[in-house]
Amino acid sequence: MSSPNPAAIKAWLLELQARIVHGLEQVDGKPFLREEWQRPEGGGGISRLVEEGNVLERGGVNFSHVRGATLPASATAVRPELAGRAWEAMGVSLVLHPRNPYAPTVHMNVRFFEATAPGKEPVWWFGGGMDLTPYYGEVEDARHFHQACRDALAPFGDELHPRFKTWCDDYFYLKHRKEPRGVGGIFFDDFNELGFEQSYAMVRTVGERFLDAYLPILQRRKDQAYGERERDFQAYRRGRYVEFNLVWDRGTLFGLQSGGRTEAILMSMPPIVKWRYDWHPEPGSPEARLYSDFLVHRDWLAP
């Protein structure tokens, strides 16, 4: 393919969703629910979800393919030149919230977007990435995750990983808290600069490396001993995840404004969350170490 073929991209996304769900089911032992849905304005999707699993307290791996006659305000605010164009968007998006506080939350998505208008060249791009949000940070886990991200991008140019890592650090930042959401990963959007074939190959590699990036971490941490203190801190820190998704995330806003399926969009919300007024961890505690050593922008692969 030298130009976009939405049918082929859709087929790959569905296969990716199935492969990731299978890998997660092998670890958790509980099957994911499967629900197909239709969007009245055009398109639909397949939601795959597990709740109260053996390892995952809540996890969703969603496929969506939606289209419309005009773009929502969240999109035209960023690309005003696309106002009035018809559009279609498709992708796989996942968020996994393990029960064990020592196992980090993870997010990944890969997506394709195309906007068309009579007599004009189609405008298309890819977006995606993955990022890790620990509650009790481990250098070994952060290094493994970032190495997998760098390995996925390496065949497409040495400059991509540092660029997409910085983009991730900047994007997944809670401006109102002045803190990163987690230890980062990679993020990219509006990406087409390699031409269609290479841009598509890059996105496929990112999606297909997700299980390599995350499953070894989940396997290491899922049976680690914990108590009520750790669960309490996990619930408090999950509040930051909610705040980011509802206040800053472009994908959440686009989905809601474009008439997407609310249940699918908000499946990223953690199942148990707490907020406290002006709380700070005890100095020198494992909880304080998350802030001092992990919620900072740093090169995790530096010697």
Image (cartoon, helix red, strand yellow):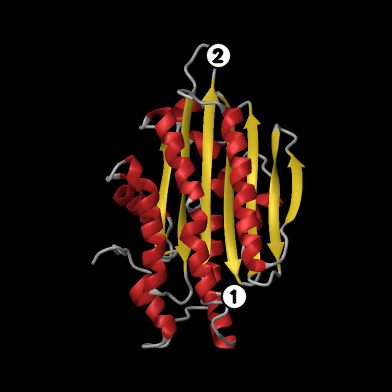
Category of crowding for the residue at label 2, using alpha-carbon neighbours closer than 10 angstroms: few (below 14), some (14–19), many (at least 20): few
Q: Which residue is mark 1?
A: 274
- Hey, which residue is sitting farthest left in the picture? 303
- Residue 302 or residue 260, whichever sits in front: 302
What separation in Å lies between label 2 and label 1 (alpha carbons)? 50 Å
Which residue shows up at 29% across the image and 63% down it? 301
Q: Is residue 237 visible?
A: no
Q: Which mark is residue 42?
A: none
Q: Which mark is residue 118?
A: 2
Residue 201 screen position, x and y as percent: 44, 37
Which residue shows up at 65% across the image and 67% down it? 28
Residue 125 screen position, x and y as percent: 46, 33
Which residue shows up at 54% across the image and 46% down it? 251
Query: Residue 184: which quarter of the image?
Result: bottom left
Residue 19 screen position, x and y as percent: 61, 50
Horizontal side of 59 relative to 165 (left or right) equals right
Horizontal side of 4 relative to 180 (left or right) equals right
Disc with the residue nearer the chain's start (2 vs 1): 2
Q: Secondary structure at mark 1?
A: loop
Residue type beneath disc 1: Lys
Category of crowding for the residue at label 1, using alpha-carbon neighbours closer than 10 angstroms: few (below 14), some (14–19), many (at least 20): few
- Hey, which residue is sitting farthest top in the picture? 119
In this rendering, the count of numbered labels is: 2
